[in-house]
Amino acid sequence: MDIEKINKTNYEKYKNKTLKDVVNESKTILEEYKNVLGLFNEEELLSDKFPTGFSWALWKYMAMDLCIHPLMHIMYQYIKRGDYNEFIKETESSKKYFMEYSGNNIKEYYFGDLFENKEEKEKRFKELREIEKNNKFIEEIIKTNME
């Protein structure tokens, strides 16, 4: 599996679409994915024998592929663009899934690898801190990304 090739293909496909259009299209794709998920029984979902490229139980891989990974990219785009209210809204609405998936590890919200440079990342998270001063969960995400 060539991740770089897949990412380049997806970039070309979506680069001229608005973030809202990408999010809406993603919802349709995610609904289809959920239907596929229903084809597996509990034993299969707990198995780590499927060729996913990871040594995880199938359920965890599917959760990452279906929910966590796409949301990370969407939330990254919100923070990168300075759309902090959308970032906060998306973070709050997905918090339950991220925390269950990660075993309550706030580091799942680390966006540092997506930013092209450290200065830009720090600038965005400092601006987020100014907007959302009293939200302890958002503050933990900020700390995770400022380390």
Image (cartoon, rainbow, N blue to C red):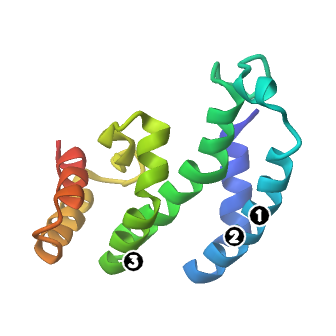
Q: Distance between the residues labelled 2 and 3?
A: 16 Å
Say which mark, if any, is on residue 86. 3
Residue 12 screen position, x and y as percent: 70, 66
Which residue in the protein does label 1 denote?
Answer: 31
> Mark 2 or mark 3, which has the lower sequence index?
2
**Amino acid type for the residue under numbered disc 1:** Glu
Q: What crowding class fits label 3: few (fewer than 14 Cα within 10 Å), some (14-19), or many (20 or more)? A: some
Q: Distance between the residues labelled 3 and 1?
A: 22 Å
Q: Residue at x 11, y 69 (%)?
A: 134
Report the side of 79 relative to 16 (left or right): left
Q: Distance between the residues labelled 1 and 2?
A: 6 Å
Look at the numbered disc 3 and give the secondary structure of its residue. Answer: helix
Outermost residue toward the right in this view: 39
On the rendered image, what quadrant is the N terminus found in? top right
Report the side of 68 relative to 8 (left or right): left
**Amino acid type for the residue under numbered disc 2:** Lys
- Compared with 27, 2 (above or below) is above
The reply to whether callout 1 and callout 2 are in contact (CB within 8 Å) is yes
**Amino acid type for the residue under numbered disc 3:** Glu
Q: Is residue 18 visible?
A: no
The reply to whether callout 3 and callout 1 are in contact (CB within 8 Å) is no
> Mark 3 or mark 1, which has the lower sequence index?
1
Which quadrant holds residue 107? top left
Q: Residue at x 23, y 56 (%)?
A: 137
On the rendered image, what quadrant is the C terminus found in? top left
